[in-house]
Image (tube, rainbow, N blue to C red):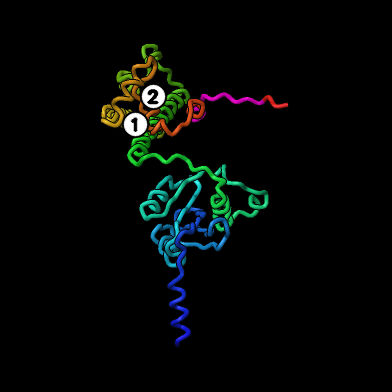
């Protein structure tokens, strides 16, 4: 009985104060695979539910008083895991999956445990550079701008679908509408088409409804973006950008929400590289 009490007391007195526990995470919808490193020395790999509180409980129970640092690859969950762990006191970063070192053997034998260990090893050795994590409100505004782009692409596809149906049915667009597609007059002409075949008539009617719905959705999104552009967080920079010829609402708001804090770029060359204007050169040898 005495031995049991002494062992329990010894276990409870263990402290990792001043030491760093690095965690490589392979994040999935329902579960995470976590590889623990004490410094850069591998300790173990385990699986858990996809909840930050469970990970924190494990860390505090097994490595009390340590500094906890976690890392995972950018993917489907965005920065939500990073924000959850950071709020719990676990320093967390997100890295580009292409930056994590990979071996041919690892590519042939790919498992969650192997992936988390690969991430953890590179992270613990300081080989990974974190990606920029925008503020939550900036990311939300970015999602709105990207949503508008998806609506615009869907609208374009529906318009092309209608034109394709007309060509298949042998219906020619009148000369007065040939140069001015998708005006209200053109929509009225489409609605008044007499298509004898039931299924073709239904198909064209549904496509017209899709176009009208998406046009309304695009209008509403543009309205929200205009309101956003004059908000305190964007107004000054938006005014500067739109003073440049060729830059309007969508281009300006895309730049502001995608770039976020421009001070994160050390120099103009890195900024050019981010927006895709940096030229490549292959002249060795």
Asked whether, in this view, residue 183 is left or right of residue 54, the answer is left
The residue at 49%/43% (across/down) is: 130
User: Label 1's element?
Assistant: helix
Categorize mark 1 by other alpha carbons within 10 Å: few (<14), some (14-19), many (20+): some
Eye-nearest disc, 1 or 2: 2
User: What is the span of residues highlighted in magenta in the rendered image?
Assistant: 273-282
Q: Specify the principal SS of the magenta part.
A: loop
The residue that appears at 40% across and 28% down in the rendered structure is 255
Which residue corresponds to mark 1? 214
Please determine whether, in this image, residue 129 is positioned above or below residue 246: below
- Residue at numbered disc 2: 251
Sequence-wise, the earlier of marks 1 and 2 is 1
Quarter occupied by the C terminus? top right
Q: Residues within 10 Å of mark 2 (few under 14, many from 20)?
A: some
Which of these two is toward me, 98 or 204? Answer: 98
> Residue 273: where, in percent of width, then height?
52, 28
Report the number of numbered marks.
2
Q: Relative to 176, does residue 263 appear above or below in the rendering? A: below
């Amino acid at each position: 009985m005495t031995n049991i009490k002494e062992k329990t007391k010894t276990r409870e007195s263990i402290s990792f104060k001043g030491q760093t526990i690095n965690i490589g995470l392979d994040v999935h919808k329902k579960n995470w695979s976590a590889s623990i490193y004490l410094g850069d020395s591998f300790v173990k790999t385990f699986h858990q539910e996809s909840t930050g509180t469970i990970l924190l409980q494990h860390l505090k129970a097994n490595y009390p008083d340590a500094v906890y640092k976690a890392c995972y690859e950018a993917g489907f969950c965005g920065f939500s895991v990073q924000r959850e762990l950071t709020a719990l006191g676990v320093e967390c970063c997100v890295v580009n999956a292409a930056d994590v070192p990979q071996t041919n053997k690892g590519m042939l034998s790919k498992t969650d445990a192997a992936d988390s260990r690969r991430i953890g090893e590179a992270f613990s050795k300081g080989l990974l550079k974190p990606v920029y994590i925008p503020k939550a409100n900036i990311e939300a505004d970015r999602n709105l701008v990207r949503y508008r782009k998806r609506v615009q692409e869907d609208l374009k596809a529906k318009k092309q679908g209608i034109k394709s149906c007309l060509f298949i049915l042998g219906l020619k667009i009148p000369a007065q509408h040939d140069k001015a597609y998708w005006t209200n007059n053109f929509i009225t002409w489409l609605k008044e088409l007499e298509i004898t075949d039931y299924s073709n008539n239904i198909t064209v009617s549904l496509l017209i409804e899709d176009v009208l719905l998406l046009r309304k959705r695009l209008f509403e999104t543009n309205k929200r973006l205009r309101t956003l552009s004059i908000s305190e967080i964007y107004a000054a920079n938006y005014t500067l950008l739109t003073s440049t010829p060729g830059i309007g609402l969508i281009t300006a708001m895309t730049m502001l929400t995608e770039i976020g804090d421009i001070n994160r770029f050390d120099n103009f060359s890195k900024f050019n590289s981010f927006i895709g204007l940096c030229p490549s050169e292959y002249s060795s040898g």
